[in-house]
Image (cartoon, helix red, strand yellow):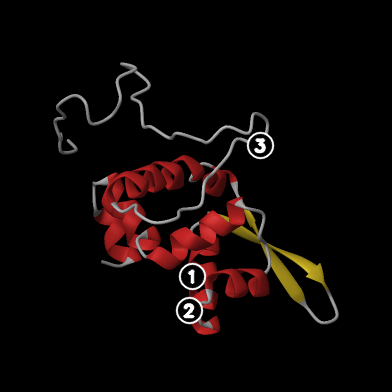
């Protein structure tokens, strides 16, 4: 699947995974939410090859999830900041993490705490219309018309 195909795919999950579907992109977004903004910070945190990181940052920027801002002219250096779309991705990361804690857990895991209350965040996905937890009621997939 590539970005060209994703524009024609009517499934919003497939469209999202077309550019966010690899682990590196999601981990970059995790780190961006933790306050990392610079290439070297991402590289050190993730242990990722510079070429892969460059490609992932370019894609996330092109797709409007991150934006580049120059922070140094000599030498020229840029940092990567979350856009509104990038900020909106945080609940996706937390729900994915909650699934991982339940089904891929074991051993010592990091915890995510609410900075104001100090309590551990317990992410759930809820349908805004019905108030029901997603996954507790049957779904129907309706093709576009």
Quadrant assignment for the N terminus: bottom left
The answer to whether the residue labelled 2 contacts the one labelled 1, judged by CB atoms less than 8 Å apart, is yes
Of residue 131 and residue 75, the one placed in the foreground of this image is 131
- 105 lies left or right of 120: left
Of residue 120 and residue 127, the one placed in the foreground of this image is 120
Q: Residue at x 54, y 49 (%)?
A: 86
**Residue 57 figure quarter:** bottom right
In the rendering, which numbered label is found on residue 115?
3
The residue that mark 2 highlights is 52
Give the farthest residue toward the front: 107
Of residue 40 and residue 82, the one placed in the foreground of this image is 40
Q: Residue at x 14, y 27 (%)?
A: 138
Q: Position of residue 108 (x, y in %)?
A: 45, 55
Q: Is residue 12 above or below residue 122?
A: below
Give the farthest residue toward the top: 130
In the rendering, which numbered label is found on residue 56?
1
Element type at mark 2: helix
- 107 lies left or right of 118: left
Element type at mark 1: helix
Q: Is residue 119 above or below residue 68?
A: above
Disc nearer the start of the sequence (2/3)? 2
């Amino acid at each position: 699947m590539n970005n060209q195909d994703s524009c024609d795919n009517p499934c919003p999950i497939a469209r999202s995974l077309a550019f966010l579907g690899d682990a590196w992109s999601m981990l970059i977004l995790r780190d961006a939410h933790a306050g990392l903004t610079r290439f070297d910070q991402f590289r050190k945190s993730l242990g990722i090859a510079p070429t892969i990181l460059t490609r992932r940052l370019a894609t996330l920027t092109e797709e409007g999830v991150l934006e580049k801002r120059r922070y140094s002219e000599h030498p020229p250096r840029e940092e990567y900041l979350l856009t509104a779309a990038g900020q909106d991705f945080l609940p996706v990361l937390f729900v994915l993490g909650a699934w991982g804690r339940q089904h891929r857990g074991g051993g010592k895991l990091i915890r995510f705490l609410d900075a104001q209350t100090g309590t551990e965040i317990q992410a759930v996905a809820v349908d805004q219309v019905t108030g029901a937890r997603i996954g507790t009621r049957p779904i129907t997939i309706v093709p576009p018309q």
